[in-house]
Amino acid sequence: MAEKEVNITYETLFELLRREKSRKDLQKLPDTFFIDVISYLNEKLNLAKTKKDELFDADENLKTEKQIINIRQILKELYERRERKIMEMALNKSRAGHAIIDTSALLDEEEHLFDALLKILNKNRDQIINNLLKGSAPSVELKVKPEPSQAEEFAEELAAQPESPEAVEESTQEQEANTTKLEIKEFVQKFIGLDMKEYGPFEQGDEVELPAEIAQLLIKRGKAAQI
């Protein structure tokens, strides 16, 4: 039997939220719920814009804008309550194995979430607890932290150099005068200096003039030589 059509209004949204809050199970919504909500909310937004453009009474404008805020709050709470129930459904399904879980109240978009959650839970259950119960180590692939890029290493080393506020101010004022001319020996990626300016990229053989602290770092790392 087809789901009875529900016209979206502020009152119906409030009632749908009340039902979702007061009942344990996920409540059935019209199949076109999201489309209907979008249409209703856009009507309210267009109405608010029209009233503002046509200089309606300020109290009427404020009333419409407040209702839009309330509609968004209702939608957000409704979504989050249903989201929590869907997560519990997926968890119960994963734990119960072949037990039948009633998913008839799921909208198509929510069913996608349910399936994705169930897949993740089942995979982790198989890789961790099922292995442990058999006396085997978990088979989860741990994420390896990527090696820092050359630019990140330069930024970290420069930032690690202790400087007082007075030294930073003096360095900023005298930056152009306190520079060193270099010949680049190896390719250097673009990076950010302590002055928050971008430097590079530099190719082998380039001759560049850089702030002294950056030049010293490049020389120390064998990336350049002073001319």
Image (cartoon, rainbow, N blue to C red):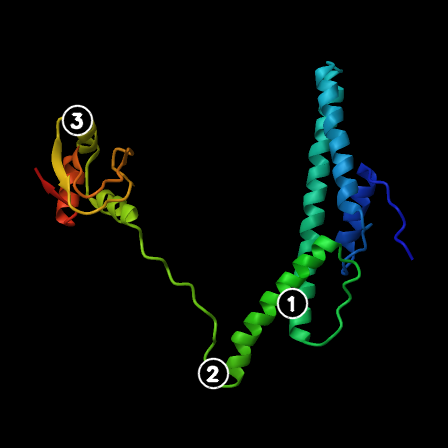
Sort mark 2 into few (<14), some (14-19) or many (20+) by Cα contacts within 10 Å: few
Badge 1 is on which residue? 91
Q: Residue 83's spot in the image, x, y percent? A: 67, 55
Placement of 68 over or under 2, stated as above or below? above
Q: Residue 4's spot in the image, x, y percent? A: 90, 50
Q: Amino acid at mark 2?
A: Ser
The answer to which quarter of the image holds residue 171 is top left
Q: Amino acid at mark 3?
A: Glu
Q: Nearer the viewer, mark 2 or mark 1?
A: 2
Q: Secondary structure at mark 3?
A: loop
Q: Nearer the viewer, mark 2 or mark 3?
A: 3
Q: Tell me the distance, in whole angstroms, between the alpha carbons under discs 2 and 1.
A: 24 Å
Q: Residue 55's spot in the image, x, y percent? A: 73, 13
The answer to which quarter of the image holds residue 23 is bottom right
Badge 3 is on which residue? 176
Query: Which residue is pictured at 70% across the width and 27% down the height?
Result: 65
Q: Identify the mark nearer the N-term, 1 or 3.
A: 1
Q: Nearer the viewer, mark 1 or mark 3?
A: 3
Q: Amino acid at mark 1?
A: Leu
Query: Which residue is pictured at 52% across the width and 86% down the height?
Result: 134
